[in-house]
């Protein structure tokens, strides 16, 4: 995918990855950010104009101090849509990005085509507390995020040798910067009362969940489904929280079938 | 030199296999390990020791704030300080301090510190820590990336509340108060001396220098490592064109005194080991929430920040290493005096927070060590900074005509008005 920088009206500098043509499909990444390779986006770009902005604090995007709370993040999402000059894009978000996409759709329900929420954050079920990602050590992420932990480990570290102190320091600082930003809407409990606003959604909505998700387990998908009118929940086998990375073919098949219907 | 006798108030009954069985002494430590009936004894013993420190001639007695942990049992240091204010009348009461970002609204700190200053007759040293990440983020739920901003706002509100003589409105990001009107107000004017405890965030240096607050470096890895950090602080002082009064800085030091070096090891080694292996056994994931430190600080200091090595190091430390590397200053009065001189000169500090009660140390050893330090070490260290001897900018200024409630109590007992 190619990338370009843009600046929103608020003044946030955003790097946007972009590929393909067709109807615009915005993708909002999770708390870990985009990986160097995102095969599911490449495949979606065969049929759609895929646009994947990085939140400030992630990758090359900066001026993160301009975003402090949920409303800032939500408006920022629409600011990016405006800066890209898009009309009625599909919105898709993964984990924290799903929470942002859902909030965007609640705020401006008539300004999107369809909504795809991939294991979104944003709800809290007291009987099913979500693990505290902010207290994970670097080596603890893979076991909570991936069905295949070894493959996940390799993806997360992007080939860095974690025994090398410099590489570890670089990973630690990058991770700290990303999660520092994510913490503004996810810490200490990832619930900014989205449940009170979901009634506003009018766009057709698909939820996709990894059957083996232990971070935000599929019971959260059922809760989302109960709260969102006209929504459908699809589960994918042999996948955990990082479902689009773990089962890209099935993920893309479900997504394109939904967007085309 | 000013010496403040500080009690961290650790829980002394952590089991021998604590380190193996439990991942952290902080945040998620099982609270079934706490026994309130033993706690009754522990609080009184620790508060009695603080009062005894005044009798021994320490300049100050100190307490601090921590939450959900076995390392220090003072979620509310002001309660301890209130007890001390009634039972002492000479020593400074160092509350180092209240984690001002955690109080809603922080006007509560302005009020309670004012109460302590008034009750103690102007003996309060007021500390404003950001708080550890364990306390502030994991236990009290503050968003890490916004903690420092919230702290800065709380600081502004408290200082204005003490300074203003008319009610005012405060339209903050985290606190909106239509009427701020501090009652009571502190005795010390314009405000009690402010101490900022720091664990290594470089932004804190400038904050201290902006307002001429004391910078208190709290570390348990000893003065040899502390020197690197304080050298950075003194460089910053020089760059900012501030005078180099050693009273701008304080250092917390674990100290154990006995008649001989051998006796010190025999008496205290097990308690020091308890402290390093149980009280400091913090799960790596709770040490530093992402966003708690700025990227600038991480870049300057990343090795210590990520270092699980430090945690792995503690159980391997022998008494000799603890002494040689300066984690602990221990030995005969002569040895302790010599090491203290090195530490005070090396770090350039005018204030020492003396950590003499360590881990699960029993009362008698604590008193023995405290007394030896007061009688055989402290007098020799008094004049380490003769050129700054009149610099009392960071010390309390009590009222001359203050009351002595603890003496009234003694008198009432002597007169038979109260049973002994």
Image: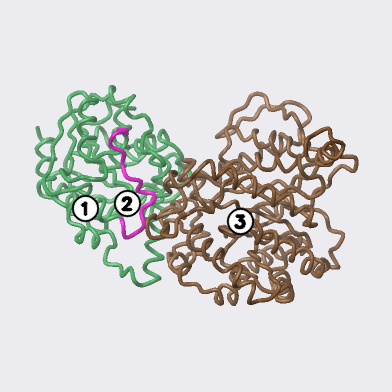
Chain colours: A green, B brown
Task: Please state if A112 lies on the left or on the right of A170 as rendered.
Answer: left
Outermost residue to the right: B401
Chain letter for the residue marked with disc 1 in the picture: A
Viewer-side residue, B84 vs B382: B84
Q: Quadrant of residue A21?
A: top left
Q: Quadrant of residue A194?
A: top left
Q: What's the distance in space between the residues labelled 3 and 1, CA to CA? A: 38 Å
Task: Please state if B112 lies on the left or on the right of A35 as rendered.
Answer: right
> Can residue B189 be spotted in the picture?
no
| Figure quadrant of the N terminus of chain A | bottom left
Query: Crowdedness of circle 1 by 10 Å Cα count: few (<14), some, many (20+)?
Result: many
Q: Are marks 3 and 2 in contact (CB under 8 Å)?
A: no
Chain letter for the residue marked with disc 2 in the picture: A
Q: Are marks 3 and 1 in contact (CB under 8 Å)?
A: no
Mark seen at residue A146: 1
- Are labels 1 and 2 assigned to the same chain? yes
Secondary element type, mark 2: loop
- Reading the image, the residue beneath label 3 is B198
Mark seen at residue A32: 2
Q: Is residue B15 magenta?
A: no
Task: Please state if B118 lies on the left or on the right of B360 as rendered.
Answer: right
Whole-percent x, y for residue B162 in the image: 74, 36
Whole-percent x, y for residue B117 in the image: 76, 39
Image point (17%, 44%), residue name: A210
Q: Is residue B283 above or below residue B345?
A: above
Q: Is residue A138 magenta?
A: yes
Whole-percent x, y for residue A231 in the image: 17, 28
| Figure quadrant of the C terminus of chain A | top left
Whole-percent x, y for residue B336 in the image: 70, 72
Region rendered in magenta: A124-140
């Amino acid at each position: 995918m190619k990338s370009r920088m843009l600046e929103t009206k608020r003044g946030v500098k955003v790097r946007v990855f972009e590929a393909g043509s067709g109807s615009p499909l915005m993708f909002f990444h999770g708390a870990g950010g985009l990986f160097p390779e995102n095969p599911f986006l490449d495949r979606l770009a065969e049929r759609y104009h895929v646009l994947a902005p990085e939140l400030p604090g992630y990758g090359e995007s900066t001026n993160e101090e301009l975003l402090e709370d949920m409303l800032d993040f939500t408006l920022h999402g629409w600011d990016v849509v405006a800066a890209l000059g898009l009309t009625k894009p599909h919105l898709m978000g993964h984990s924290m990005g799903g929470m942002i996409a859902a909030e965007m759709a609640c705020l401006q329900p008539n300004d999107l085509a369809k909504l795809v929420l991939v294991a979104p954050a944003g709800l809290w079920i007291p009987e099913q507390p979500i693990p505290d990602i902010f207290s994970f050590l670097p080596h603890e992420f893979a076991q909570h995020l991936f069905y295949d932990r070894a493959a996940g480990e390799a993806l997360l570290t992007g080939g860095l040798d974690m025994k090398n102190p410099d590489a570890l320091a670089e990973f630690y600082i990058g991770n700290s910067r990303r999660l520092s930003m994510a913490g503004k809407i996810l810490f200490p409990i990832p619930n900014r009362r989205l449940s009170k606003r979901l009634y506003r959604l009018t766009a057709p909505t698909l939820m996709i969940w990894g059957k083996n998700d232990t971070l935000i387990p599929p019971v959260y998908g059922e809760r989302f489904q109960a709260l969102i009118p006209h929504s459908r929940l699809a589960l994918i086998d042999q996948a955990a929280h990082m479902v689009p990375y773990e089962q890209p073919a099935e993920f893309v098949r479900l997504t394109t079938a939904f967007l085309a219907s | 030199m000013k010496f403040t006798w500080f009690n961290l108030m650790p829980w002394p009954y952590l089991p021998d296999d604590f380190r193996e069985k439990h991942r952290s002494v902080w945040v998620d430590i099982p609270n079934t390990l706490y026994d309130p009936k033993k706690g009754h004894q522990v609080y009184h013993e620790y508060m009695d020791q603080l009062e005894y420190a005044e009798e021994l001639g320490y300049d100050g007695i100190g307490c601090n704030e921590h939450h959900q942990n076995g390392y220090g049992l003072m979620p509310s240091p002001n309660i301890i300080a209130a007890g001390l204010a009634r039972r002492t009348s000479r020593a400074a009461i160092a509350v180092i301090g209240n984690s001002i970002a955690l109080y809603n609204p922080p006007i509560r700190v302005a009020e309670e510190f004012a109460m302590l200053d008034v009750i103690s007759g102007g003996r309060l040293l007021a500390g404003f820590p950001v708080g550890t990440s364990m306390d502030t983020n994991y236990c009290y739920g503050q968003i890490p990336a916004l903690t420092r901003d919230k702290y800065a706002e709380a600081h502004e509100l408290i200082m204005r509340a003490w300074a203003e003589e008319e009610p005012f409105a405060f339209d903050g990001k985290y606190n909106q108060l239509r009427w701020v009107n501090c009652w009571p107000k502190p005795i010390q004017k314009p405000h009690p001396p402010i101490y900022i405890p720091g664990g290594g965030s470089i932004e804190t240096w400038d904050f201290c220098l902006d307002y001429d607050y004391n910078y208190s470096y709290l570390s348990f890895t000893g003065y040899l490592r502390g020197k690197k950090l304080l050298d950075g602080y003194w460089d910053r002082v020089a760059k900012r064109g501030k005078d180099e009064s050693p009273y701008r800085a304080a250092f917390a030091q674990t100290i154990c005194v006995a008649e001989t070096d051998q006796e010190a090891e025999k008496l205290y080694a097990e308690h020091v080991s308890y402290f390093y292996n149980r009280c400091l056994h913090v799960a790596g994931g709770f040490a530093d929430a992402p966003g708690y430190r700025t990227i600038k600080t991480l870049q300057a200091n990343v090795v210590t920040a990520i270092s699980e090595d430090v945690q792995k190091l503690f159980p391997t430390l022998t008494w000799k290493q603890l002494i040689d590397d300066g984690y602990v200053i221990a030995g005969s009065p002569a040895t302790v005096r010599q090491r203290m001189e090195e530490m005070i000169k090396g770090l350039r500090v005018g204030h020492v927070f003396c950590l003499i009660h360590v881990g699960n140390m029993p009362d008698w050893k604590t008193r023995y060590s405290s007394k030896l330090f007061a009688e055989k070490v402290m007098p020799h260290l008094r004049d380490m900074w003769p050129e700054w001897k009149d610099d009392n900018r960071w010390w309390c200024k009590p009222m001359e005509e203050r009351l002595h409630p603890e003496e009234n109590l003694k008198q009432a007992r002597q007169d038979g008005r109260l049973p002994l």
